Amino acid sequence: MLLDWMMNIENNQNLLFSEFLSLSKMNGYEATVGLASLLESKETTTCSFVQFLKNQGAIPFCLTNVPQGLLSYITSNPLYGTTKNPWDFSRTPGGSSGGEAALLAAGGSVFGIGNDLVGSLRIPAAFCGLVTLKPTQDRLHESAMNPGLPGRGRLGLSSGFFTKNVEDQEFLLRQIVGNPKYHQMCPYSSLSPLLSTNDSLKKPVIGWFVDDGFGVVAPSNRRAVEETIEKLRTQGYEIKEFKMNDIDEKFQSYTVADMLFRNVMPDNGDYMSEMYSGEPYDRFMSHFIRLVRFKQVFIIRWLAQYVLLPLIQFTPFKSKQVLCLGNAYNANPSCVRQNQEKTDAFKFKWIKYWKNLGIDALICPSFITPAQPYEYPVQLSTGVFITGLFNMLDCPAGIVPVSPVREKENDKLETKEDFILKLQSKAIKETTGMPNAVQIVTLPNHEEMCLNVMKTVEKLTDGVQNLKWKSENQTIWTNGDSFECFERVDKPTIVCKP
């Protein structure tokens, strides 16, 4: 265990002494974010997060892959190719920190780091069987980082860790959260350290939901939450159902989703369109990039909003989620202001409902599916509502693996003639044995409670076993190709694909 190794280091004040660290950007090295236009540019600064870890003795040893432009949960770009999920090479490890998660899941690193804007830590952790915690933004602020989306709306951007267990997660967070030396490097980061997670003998009250009112989660992801809640109930925890559409009649789930998507692109995609201009399109992101660029042409935008979207409900492509995403358009600066005002009002209503319900933590699905084949993340982009919601609320949100996906449990998903649900039904086929996790959420600045519940869930559930290397079949890198061999604990054969 990482913690055991660190605590046995004698006569050394740097607690991460000689620990190898993978990352996505560093001073003196290219940080292309998958864009050809940045190939010749080298970083002139190291972000405060990485610099602090280096000061603690960590040794950066490699850069990991990210999506083209960062804004996706498919880690693929034209420069470095497509990152595979080590659990199943036909599926993505998630994104945007997918390269980091894949490396750790494959045993190539001791811990990983990343950022989370609408799930960039949590989605890869859920897809790869890892633990992570997205803190409140100012609890672990970061300077000199790539913001992913400059000028975004009311969305908390957080930095955090990937680990194999909650104990290591807590240990790493304790080294940096509230650390005066880190605060000197990044004054926007809080000086409040993590308190002990075992101070209270009173069991926390747990809220839960499997239906956010907007998307539909896969049977495996629903089962993960329901079984976790039952195990907590049998241990004497008070359980209360959390109903999203009971928060306030003005803030039904589709309204909240509309607010989220407008906050993601307050400029209606102008920044992204310029970023992708002149770039080769990644094969798995090409549809998304074209849509972003077409949206800048007024006549196409007008036709889409006032002609195509109203008609889509009468076609085979009908979907309420598609309509919601398509209508999330800010016509002028006043619309941006109004959306931010609505977001602030929703935060107030959320906390009021939470406190009236009397809960300390919330358990909900980690995502709408387990790890998906490469062609689906762009088509199922509305799925980020279940993770992006907690960036908009700036709540701590952690991921804990609770079990593998069981045989045949994802064979059938009720689609109700919905285009998105039909795609989702295809994406979850043949996921038996893939990691399955839950998401644990607390109020802003309550990371200690989040970690406490994460530890309890980890103890009560089965989790997922680590992938094992076959010593005679180490990963071999050739010119642009990799041949990787891992032993799946749940399968007697070796997973080995070029």
Image: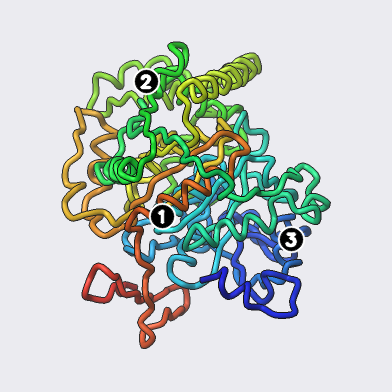
Which mark lies nearer to you, 1 or 2?
Answer: 1
Q: Amino acid at mark 3?
A: Phe
Q: Which residue is mark 1?
A: 458
Mark sitting earlier along the chain (1/2)? 2
Which mark lies nearer to you, 1 or 3?
Answer: 1
Colour scheme of the rendered structure: rainbow
Disc 3 element: helix
Q: Nearer the viewer, residue 331 or 161?
A: 161
Q: Is residue 459 above or below residue 117?
A: below
User: What is the CA distance from the residue labelled 1 to the residue labelled 3?
Assistant: 29 Å
User: What is the CA distance from the residue labelled 1 to the residue labelled 2?
Assistant: 44 Å
Disc 2 element: helix
Provide residue 119's location: percent of width, then percent of height. 50, 44
- Residue 278 appears in the figure: no
Q: In the current view of this chain or complex, which residue is farthest to the bottom?
A: 472
Q: Is residue 206 left or right of residue 192?
A: left
Provide residue 156's location: percent of width, then percent of height. 61, 37
Mark sitting earlier along the chain (3/2)? 3
Q: Which residue is mark 2?
A: 309
User: What is the CA distance from the residue labelled 3 to the residue labelled 2?
Assistant: 48 Å
**On residue 270, which mark appears?**
none
Q: Which residue is mark 3?
A: 52
- Mark 1 burial class by Cα count in 10 Å: few <14, some 14-19, many 20+: some
